[in-house]
Structures are given as C-alpha cells and as structure tokens.
Image (spheres, rainbow, N blue to C red):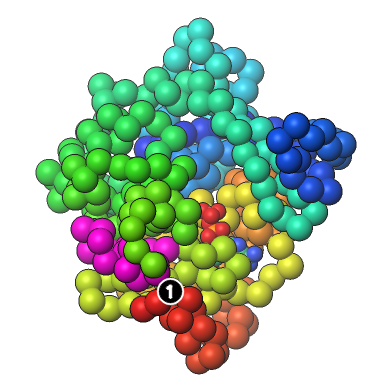
C-alpha cells in the first residue's frame, strides 16, 4: 500500500529579485527584473514530497481570494498534490519578498496573509496517514493541534522547525523527526558548544541538522549519520532546505533507512540549488535517481570532517 503524507503549512507567491549582493540596512541595491515563483515552506515541501513519487501526498493550506492564489494552486496540483484548501475571503494570499545575491545567498521577508488564518478547526481527518510534515509558517496552535492529533493516531510527526524560533517543550515532545538548520537549532537550544551537544538536549528520537553546502548530520537514538553535501555549482539556494525536507520524508515513507534517505534528500537539495525558484527547481524522482547513480560516494575524509564539525 502506498504511504500517505499530509503536509500542513504555508503557500506564498515569491517575488524574487537577483542583485550583486543583499542590501545592508538602509542600503538600496539595483537588481535584475522581478520574477515570481510559487513558494512557501509548506507548498515547497509538498511539491518535493510529490515529485519524489513514492507516496500519496496531500496538503492543508490557506489561500486568499486574489490573483496570487491561482499560480500556487496550479503548481501544487500539477505536481500531483491533493489539496485541503481553506479559502480566506478579504485576506491576501501569502507572499515572500526575496533578494538573491550573485553568490546564491538569499534574504527573505514573508507577509503571511492567508497562512495566518489556517486554524485547528480546518484540520482534516488524519486517519490512514503515515506521516505529517509541519513547519512554522502557520499559527503555532494549529501546528500543535496537528502534532497532537497525529501522535494520538500513531502517525509519524515530522517538524521542520523553520523559520527559527523557540518552541514550547509540549510541541517538541510530540515530534518523532525534527529537521533544523544550524540557526534553527540554536533558536531551539540556546545552550551547548557543538551541534551534538545541542541535539542531545532535544527529545525527538530522530534529529536531522542541515548545514548548507557542508551537508547534513542526523542522530537516530544513539547512532549518528553524516552526509557530506554533493558538489554542484549553486545559483540559488532558495528552497534547498524545503526540497531536502520533502524528499527526506518521501524517502522514509517509501521505507528507505535513514542513511539512504539522507543521501537522497541531500542530492535533491543540491540539485535544487542549480536552478532559480523554489518549486520550479525541485528535481523529479527519475532525474534525481539517474543523477545519484553517477554521483561519487562520500569520501572517508569528508565524513570525518563533518563529524568533527558537528562535535559528535
Ligand atoms: P536551509 O535552506 O533550510 O537553511 P540548508 O541550506 O542547510 O537548508 O540546505 C539543506 C540541504 O540542501 C543541505 O543539507 C544540503 O544537503 C543541500 N544543500 C544546500 N546548499 C547546498 C549547496 N550549495 N551545495 C550542495 N548542497 C546544498
């Protein structure tokens, strides 16, 4: 039977301008032409899950009743995501204003709009799901209610704790798989000199920490895994983390062990950096598998360097 994944979270229309560098406070930078792309952490992760092809993927999302909603809906449906769509009247669809620099860094301002109106009362029936995948661009009460209901049904709760913020212990205790980057980890666990020390203070059985172009590490119980990043020429890292999260959950839902799922998700994250846009850059499963088949295995030195960087 196919695994069933529900992604619950944000959908934003991304307004992207490329510039030589990201402006400092008070600075004005002349950039290239404006481009718009479907984005939002929740929608990006749902598309990444669906493109991985291994599971039935649905998304719970809220959109406004405006022109920005249609491209978001279309991108999700085209990827094969089933929608639990809450239409919020008289509120704008979520938007994000993104500056991408020539060295592929980005700075993002989000106007949540309809995403802020996704409430516990909108949560659909969770029976039959294998995984729920959550982020923090919708109200925290909704995230907690989803985690509680999923946990009660034995559904695996995956939280990408992004954007960075402190979280109540009540929510962290409900999470089976936590995915964070270094900044998000520091916001959750302010104490600790190393990644390993901070991860040790988290209650989830599986914790994955992404480290951008360095790669990622994961602790499963007492076992650590290290996956160095694949070398690519990055042009836009927007959505790399979301692609990683969605691909990881899809691979796990397909029955892959954590180490293999980390490798698959890392390859997806790396390829997502090679094209502009968030959802537009998410690779399809076939292309990804072909690319992975010819990608070199990580060297012992790169794994050792990553272990050292994590302090594990
Ligand atoms: P976030 O965008 O949430 O901060 P990261 O930047 O850590 O997430 O990226 C998530 C994953 O995507 C990384 O762990 C890595 O596997 C891959 N990735 C990100 N940036 C690059 C890059 N420049 N080159 C290769 N892989 C990358």
Residue 100 visible to the viewer: yes
The C terminus - image quarter: bottom left
Residue 267 in the image: above or below residue 114 = below
Q: Position of residue 275 (x, y in %)?
A: 71, 55
Residue 247 visible to the viewer: no
Residue 64 in the image: above or below residue 83 = above
185 relative position to 213: left or right: left
Q: Residue most toward the left?
A: 152
Residue ID at (75%, 40%): 23
The N terminus - image quarter: bottom left
Residue 195 in the image: above or below residue 190 = below
Residue 298 in the image: above or below residue 178 = below
| Residue designated by label 1 | 310
Residue ID at (82%, 33%): 28
Find the magenta span and give its range. 194-209
68 relative position to 144: left or right: right
């Amino acid at each position: 039977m196919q695994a069933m994944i529900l992604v619950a979270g944000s959908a934003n229309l991304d307004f992207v301008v490329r510039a030589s560098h990201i402006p400092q406070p008070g600075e004005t930078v002349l950039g290239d032409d404006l481009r718009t792309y479907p984005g939002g952490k929740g929608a990006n992760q749902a598309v990444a899950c669906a493109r991985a092809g291994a599971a039935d993927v649905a998304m719970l999302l809220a959109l406004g009743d405006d022109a920005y909603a249609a491209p978001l809906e279309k991108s999700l449906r085209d990827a094969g995501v089933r929608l639990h769509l809450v239409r919020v009247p008289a509120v704008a669809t979520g938007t994000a204003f993104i500056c991408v620099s020539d060295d592929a860094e980005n700075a993002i301002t989000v106007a949540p709009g309809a995403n802020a109106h996704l409430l516990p009362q909108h949560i659909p029936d969770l029976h039959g799901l294998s995984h729920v995948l959550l982020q923090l661009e919708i109200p925290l009460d909704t995230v907690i209610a989803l985690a509680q209901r999923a946990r009660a049904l034995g559904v695996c709760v995956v939280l990408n704790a992004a954007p960075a913020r402190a979280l109540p212990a009540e929510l962290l205790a409900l999470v089976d798989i936590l995915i964070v980057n270094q900044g998000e980890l520091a916001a959750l666990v302010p104490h600790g000199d190393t990644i390993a020390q901070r991860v040790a203070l988290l209650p989830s059985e599986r914790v994955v920490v992404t480290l951008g172009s360095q790669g990622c590490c994961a602790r499963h119980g007492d076992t650590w895994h290290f996956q160095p990043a694949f070398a690519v020429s990055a042009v836009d890292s927007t959505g790399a983390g979301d692609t990683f999260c969605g691909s990881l959950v899809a691979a796990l839902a397909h029955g892959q062990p954590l180490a293999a799922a980390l490798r698959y998700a890392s390859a997806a994250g790396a390829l997502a950096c090679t094209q502009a846009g968030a959802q537009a850059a998410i690779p399809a499963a076939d292309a990804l598998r072909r690319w992975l088949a010819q990608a070199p295995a990580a060297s012992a030195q790169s794994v050792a360097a990553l272990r050292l960087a994590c302090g594990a």
